[in-house]
Image (spheres, rainbow, N blue to C red):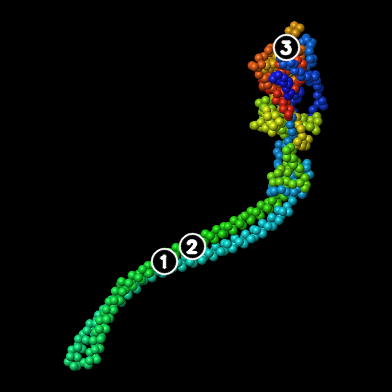
Amino acid sequence: MSSVAQSGVSVEVHALQPSRPVVATARRAPAARALRPWMIVMMVAVLGGGGWLAVSVFKPAGDASESTLHTVARRSFPVIIESKGELKAKKTTEVKCKVEGRSTIIWLIEEGTTVAEGDLLVRLASDQIDERVQQEEANEASAIAALEAAEKDLEILIDQNLSDIRKSELAVEIAGIELEKYTKGDAVKTLKTNELAIDRVAQSLKRADLEFTAARQLREKGWMTESDYLEKEFALKEAERAVETSNLDLHVFQTYTHPKDLRQRESDVDEAKKELERVRKSALAKEAQRKAEVEAKRAALLNAQNNLKKFREQKEYTEIKAPAPGLVVFDTGNRWDPAKIAEGGEVFEYQTIVSLPDTTVMIVSVRIHEAKTNLITIGQKATIEIEGIPDVIFSGEVSKIAPLADSRNQWLNPDLKEYETEITLETNEHDLKPGVTARSEILVSELKDVVAVPLQAVYSKGGKHYVFKPSGPAAEPIEVNLGESSNDYVEVTSGLDTGERVYLAVSDDAKRLLPEVDSSAAGPMNASAVSSGGTRSVSGSGGAPARRAGGPGRGPAGGSRGGGRRG
């Protein structure tokens, strides 16, 4: 598409090539196409004053009667969108570098080679990785030995803890037995022994008293010597002292010895229980510590094993093999950060080194202007011409339409919104390669037996469309409603009948007969009425012929060679 703007008024004129029917398989195209007369001369002029812009194809000036007349008739023609894009594989596998950091390429397969799955593509230097593998193997062996030692220490500690706990439990049991033995045995025995001693000395005291009384009587009668008497007297006193001693022993046992021994044995039981609790807690703490040490050793071993596994994988990654069959294409990066894939070059982790397009199914990736996206649908047939394969036309169909506009080129033109569209080829008999320029024609619809006029016969002004009919010696503008258009013809839905005659070109004076349009109320030419934009857009009065151009949606990748919706 080309547009000419002057004094705030835009002019858009579209010239399209004749369409060709879609073919089922690749076929030979005509060797050359005849150039149409209206494509030979194109001029654009902007007039001063009121800012009129006029279009004339054959002559810049002259009477309407001298222009070529065309008889309106019914026609059948296809509506086609033409676009230019790039040939790609429908399925492409990217092969990336998985080695950490930067690596040097020491061997590289030749670009353009067709490979099978598992074929070697790239070999990277692995000296440093080999050293790390050896280091991690040594670390793994050390970690295994440390873990085994820690596990044995844990087993020994568990046995020692069980032994200490059993000893403490036994001590508690013995202390309890000692307490019971004392309260039910030793203390009772001692009490009874003391009571028996008191009874015994009391009996001895009674006998000593009787003997002393008898001795005193015998001494008075002179029958006992003085020494015997004194002995009996001493025996009585000794018996009395023995009674006092026995009573004192019982008092001391009951008051002091028994409470003291009872408290001691009760304390022994309490201390034995507390010691058992301390031993149990200590055992748990020591066991938890040793278990933590074991887990730390196990974690160290796992870390060493993971490192060893990682570096062994890194070693494997130094030999990059094809994950799928395809054609070897080196990645070149982008225009801002180009990459050079070659032996001796460096690559970094996750960098794409090779792409493997599967050329068995190829697509053409084109960009469709947003004004035409409503015309295309999945499954529409298309024909494709590919650079380097002259005189061959491939058939295909639309297989994918991007849901969002592609913004990659918005920095060049922020207002440009295009949708990436894929056309799948039905055959690859010519061993097609990715990256080749391709031109496609998408068949939008087929108009059958409709009233149509040549595109150059239609003039647009203020969003309305006109044709010029003979009116005596002059030309008279007649408003018409348009439908879809092809590269040559546009459907007229109302305003003309078959058999009427219209001018293909008129003079500047005739163009001034077009109705005036209020610039504040008039909008741009209705692009949806004639998507191909094949009509002439006129604003103002008079002027030189305008240059023919593509449609309103024509972008860097090409424009439409056919139409749009019915207006």
Determine the image quadrant of residue 114: top right
Q: Secondary structure at mark 3?
A: loop
Q: Name which residue type carries label 2.
A: Ser
Mark 2–mark 1 Cα distance, whole angstroms, equals 16 Å
Give the residue drawn at x 76%, y 32%: 437
Q: Residue at x 79, y 14 (%)?
A: 59
Callout 1: SS: helix
Distance of label 1 from label 3 (alpha carbons): 124 Å
Question: Which residue carries the number 2 mark?
Answer: 282
User: What amino acid does circle 1 point to?
Assistant: Glu
Percent x, y of residue 420: 69, 32
Q: How many other residues sit within 10 Å of disc 1, few (<14), some (14-19) or many (≥20)?
A: some
Amino acid at dot 3: Arg
- In the rendered image, the vertical position of residue 491 relative to residue 332, given as above or below: above
Tell me the number on the disc at residue 165.
Answer: none
Residue bearing mark 3: 512
Where in the figure is residue 470, as x and y percent of width and height? 74, 9
Regarding mark 2 in the picture, which secondary structure is present there? helix
Q: Quadrant of the N terminus?
A: top right
Tell which residue pokes out farthest to the front in this image: 49
| Quarter holding residue 80 | top right
**How many C-alpha atoms fall within 10 Å of the one at disc 2: few (<14), some, or many (≥20)?**
some
Instruction: Look at mark 1 in the image and give the residue it sits on.
Output: 271
* Residue 156 in view here: yes
Residue name at image x 22 percent, y 82 percent? 206
**Residue 481 in view of the camera:** no
Badges 2 and 1: C-beta atoms under 8 Å apart? no
Q: How many marks?
A: 3
Q: x%, y% of residue 89?
A: 72, 37
Question: Eyeballing the image, is 271 above or below 323?
Answer: below
- Pick the quarter of the image with the C terminus: top right
Question: Which tag, 2 or 1, sits closer to the chain's start?
Answer: 1
